[in-house]
Amino acid sequence: MSGYFTEDIGAQELQERTAVATDIAEAVRTLIADTVLTEVDASAAATAIEHIEAAAEILRSRQLPDDSFGVRFNTDGTKRTWGNAVIGTRNPIAPPLDVVFDDDGLAWAEFEMGPAYEGPAGLVHGGILAAILDQILGSAAEHAGAPGMTGTLTIRYRQGTKLGKVRAEARLDRVEGVKSIAVGRISTAEGTTAEAEGIFILPRWARESGAADKIRKALSDG
Ligand SMILES: CCCCCCCCCCCC(=O)SCCNC(=O)CCNC(=O)[C@H](O)C(C)(C)COP(=O)(O)OP(=O)(O)OC[C@H]1O[C@@H](n2cnc3c(N)ncnc32)[C@H](O)[C@@H]1OP(=O)(O)O
């Protein structure tokens, strides 16, 4: 099971690491939006690039040995998926979604979709919406105790999703053997913009290694 780790990080250190990760990711997220919108000339851009490269060098001075963050289970029962492209605390590409799990099984998140996520003019890219739906449906299934990898994701885009405040929600609909079927939607102030159904399959390697129990027990903190 490569890419999965077990760690023993104390509460205070975890809090500090979370703050650092959140701050760096947010700064880079802002940088991405600024990059999309900037109209500076070549000389100003060259200066900006020098600063960006200097910042990158600082970040590279101490890094994980692998090419991915992976999934990191902590001894306190939490798990970190900070590299995740949708919920990753340390991933500036992620909006990120801070998923809330209600007692009735609804998983939901409200977040901002800025200029970095544009597809059609002023609207969120359909592939980005697919990623968000994939994640929130998968998270709902996982939180309900029926985790799996996406086998099939079906999306119906009903109307454009305007950049700005967006809500995503999902719930586990049913379990059929190793398949968990989750349903969900994206909405804005204008109502539902996309609906999805996903089939999440507990992969053979997880069925055979007992990893599924570990994943079921760990609470994700993004
Ligand atoms: C634990 C991690 C948690 C991780 C939890 C994380 C939640 C995060 C959400 C983010 C989700 C992602 O991005 S996941 C990343 C994107 N997805 C992937 O990379 C998946 C790539 N595909 C695969 O790894 C594999 O094809 C699987 C796991 C989907 C299936 O492989 P398998 O486990 O060997 O399946 P197999 O025994 O043949 O079939 C089992 C049952 O599933 C059905 N089935 C097989 N493939 C499909 C399919 N694509 N769509 C529908 N149904 C399918 C079969 O008919 C069978 O039904 P029956 O006879 O039993 O009726």
Image: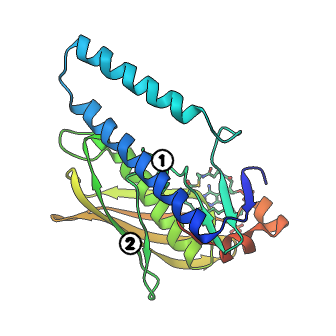
Quadrant assignment, res 115: top left
Q: Position of residue 62 (x, y in %)?
A: 62, 37
Which quadrant holds residue 51?
top left
Colour scheme in use: rainbow
Confirm or reject: label 2 Cβ below 8 Å from ligand 1: no
**25 with respect to 216 (left or right):** left
Camera-side residue of 171 and 29: 29
- As displayed, is residue 98 above or below residue 40? below
Res 141 label? none
Q: Which residue is mark 2?
A: 108
Quadrant of the image for the N terminus?
Answer: bottom right
SS of the residue at dot 1? loop
> Is 220 above or below relative to 33?
below
- Per the image, the residue denoted by label 1 is 91
Residue sitting at x 49%, y 50%: 90
Q: Amino acid at mark 1?
A: Asn
Asked whether 69 or 175 is in front, the reply is 69
- Residue 154 picture location, percent across and down: 45, 58
| Residue 95, x across and y down, in percent | 37, 52
- Residue 116 is left or right of residue 37, and the answer is right
The image shows residue 24, relative to residue 88, as above or below, that is: above
Give the foreground label among 2 and 1.
1
Q: Which residue is at 41% across, 65% downward?
A: 98
Q: Residue furthest top?
A: 43
CB at disc 1 and ligand 1 closer than 8 Å? no
Q: Is residue 16 left or right of residue 30?
A: right
Q: CA distance from mark 2 to mark 1?
A: 20 Å
Instruction: Please tell me how crowded label 1 is: few (under 14), some (14-19), or many (20+) other residues with Cα within 10 Å.
Output: many
Ligand 1, by image quadrant, is: bottom right
Taking the image as drawn, is residue 159 in sight?
A: no
Asked if residue 92 shows in the view, the reply is yes
Q: Secondary structure at mark 2?
A: strand
